[in-house]
Amino acid sequence: MTPFDALGTTEMINIRPEGSALDILSAGSSLDILPEGAALGPSIETLLDRAFGPGRTAKTSYRYREGVAPLSHLCFTAFTDGALTGTVRHWPLRLSGPRGAPLTVALLGPIAVDPALRIGGIGGNLMRHAIAEAKRSGTDMIILVGDPAYYSRFGFRSASHFGVMMPDEAASRVQALPLTAQAAALRDGGLVLPAGELVGVSAPALLRQGPIVRAA
Ligand SMILES: CC(C)(COP(=O)(O)OP(=O)(O)OC[C@H]1O[C@@H](n2cnc3c(N)ncnc32)[C@H](O)[C@@H]1OP(=O)(O)O)[C@@H](O)C(=O)NCCC(=O)NCCS
């Protein structure tokens, strides 16, 4: 049994904060994790601007999202006492390397919490809910670029263990969480490629053309 088997899979959770992890929220505050609604788009962009600052879309990981729709069933928001305080999204990926049946892979990001409410458990609740939903919906693996010190607590480990590489990103920050036995056994994942319109473009061709990834 993985740590995620015990997680709930409901579309919405409501948490009454208790204990030290949520002390930053006022007593009696409520935390709701909800599917992202279309109307929330502008509010989420504002939250992301506050969390990451200007220029956030210049990050390498955004190139994997250009022209690709997010995985709507894996996009969630956190509301604290009715106010938007957190967001997490996922995007479809494919891997260049695996033999046999293709894996369903999701790129997690961005995840962000209102700067005024950080270290209060909101990010962790978003992460656990998203992981549970990814597992429930049949996602084989989640990949992200981030600080291992934060994401290891959710079961993420170096993507290199699975042979998964993300050009232009520091290998130590590229992490993966297998959600199926097939993904856990993966050792030749290869290059991370955006799913969608680039399907059919070989990894070497993509590296030569360089619209998404550049040769080192
Ligand atoms: C990263 C982020 C989503 C975490 O959400 P959060 O609600 O603040 O964090 P949580 O309350 O769930 O977790 C708190 C714990 O995570 C740790 N933590 C938070 N951010 C961390 C980071 N970037 N690196 C390492 N540890 C981190 C805290 O030290 C705390 O540790 P503890 O449990 O040992 O005390 C949030 O801080 C944020 O929005 N950061 C700015 C945007 C960002 O960097 N997003 C991630 C891009 S990879």
Image (spheres, rainbow, N blue to C red):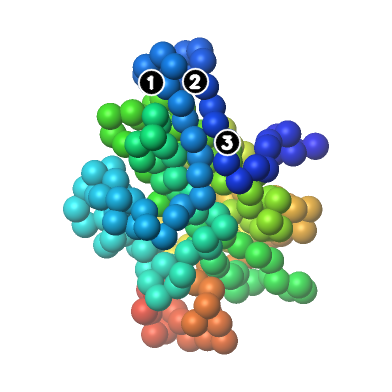
x and y percent of residue 68 in the render? 45, 72
Residue at figure coordinates x 53%, y 62% from the top left: 71
The quarter of the picture where the N terminus appears is top right
Report, in whole angstroms, how far the alpha carbon at label 3 lies from the one at label 2: 12 Å
- Characterize the local packing of mark 1: few (<14), some (14-19) or many (20 or more) Cα atoms within 10 angstroms: many
Q: Check the image and report above or below for 99 versus 45.
A: below
Judging by the rendered image, the residue that carries numbered circle 3 is 13
Circle 2 sits in a helix, a strand or a loop, which is it? Answer: loop
Q: Check the image and report above or below for 61 versus 153.
A: below
Judging by the rendered image, the residue that carries numbered circle 2 is 17
Circle 1 sits in a helix, a strand or a loop, which is it? Answer: loop
Residue 63's tag is: none
In the image, what residue type sits under mark 1?
Leu
Residue at figure coordinates x 28%, y 34% from the top left: 115
Does any portion of residue 171 appear in the rendered image? Answer: no
The quarter of the picture where the C terminus appears is bottom left
Q: Do the residues labelled 2 and 1 touch (CB within 8 Å)?
A: yes
Residue at figure coordinates x 40%, y 75% from the top left: 67
In the image, what residue type sits under mark 3?
Ile
x and y percent of residue 123 in the render? 45, 36
Report, in whole angstroms, how far the alpha carbon at label 2 lies from the one at label 1: 8 Å
Judging by the rendered image, the residue that carries numbered circle 1 is 25
